[in-house]
Amino acid sequence: MRRLHLVAGIAALFIFLATGIYMRTHHPLVEENRLLFRSRHIYILSAALANLLLGAYVRPAIRWMQWIGSVLLLLSPLLLVTAFIIEPVSGQPPGVFSRLGLYVLLAGTLLHTLATVSAPAA
């Protein structure tokens, strides 16, 4: 699972860089749309960093909690990249993909934290 988190984190980090390049080279006409792109851009960074950290530091704890937390954390960048692609164009405040992506990121992080804190000391 560690390797999968590292790969997902590195991939999301490259996507973060790509979305930054996209935002620098494509200037939306409406200022609000630029802010919508920027917020989703930062969301992608948060998911990338969470996966990179988990890939670097995960240690055995309560297995089922870690497994569910890992699935959620791996799903988060996918939802947040989808939010970057779809939501700002609609010109509406945070939509389904960004909201779900952030909740999934939160839930996965909390499950991993709870699994580590609850695990018996080795």
Image (cartoon, grey):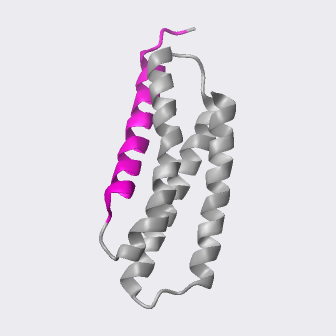
Q: Residue at x 43, y 66 (%)?
A: 86
Q: Quadrant of the N terminus?
A: top right
- Name the spot of residue 71 as percent of width and height, x first: 50, 33
Q: Nearer the viewer, residue 90 or 100?
A: 90
* Residue 99 picture quarter: bottom left
Q: Is 53 placed above or below 27 here? A: above
Q: Residue at x 44, y 91 (%)?
A: 29
* Residue 108 visible somewhere in the drawing: yes
Q: Is 30 placed above or below 74 here? A: below
- Name the spot of residue 111 as percent of width and height, x first: 41, 28
Along the horizontal axis of the image, is 33 left or right of 70? left
* Residue 117 picture quarter: top left
Q: Nearer the viewer, residue 112 or 7?
A: 7
Along the horizontal axis of the image, is 116 left or right of 12? left
Q: Residue at x 47, y 71 (%)?
A: 38
Q: Is 16 placed above or below 6 here? A: below
- Name the spot of residue 28 as percent of width and height, x first: 48, 86
* Residue 43 visible somewhere in the drawing: no
- Name the spot of residue 21 as percent of width and height, x first: 64, 74
Q: Quadrant of the C terminus?
A: top right
Q: Nearer the viewer, residue 122 or 51?
A: 51
Residue 118 belongs to the span the image colors magenta: yes
* Residue 40 picture quarter: bottom left
Q: Residue at x 47, y 13 (%)?
A: 119
Boundaries of the magenta span: 94-121
Magenta stretch, main secondary structure class: helix
Q: Is 62 placed above or below 1 here? A: above
Along the horizontal axis of the image, is 60 left or right of 14? left
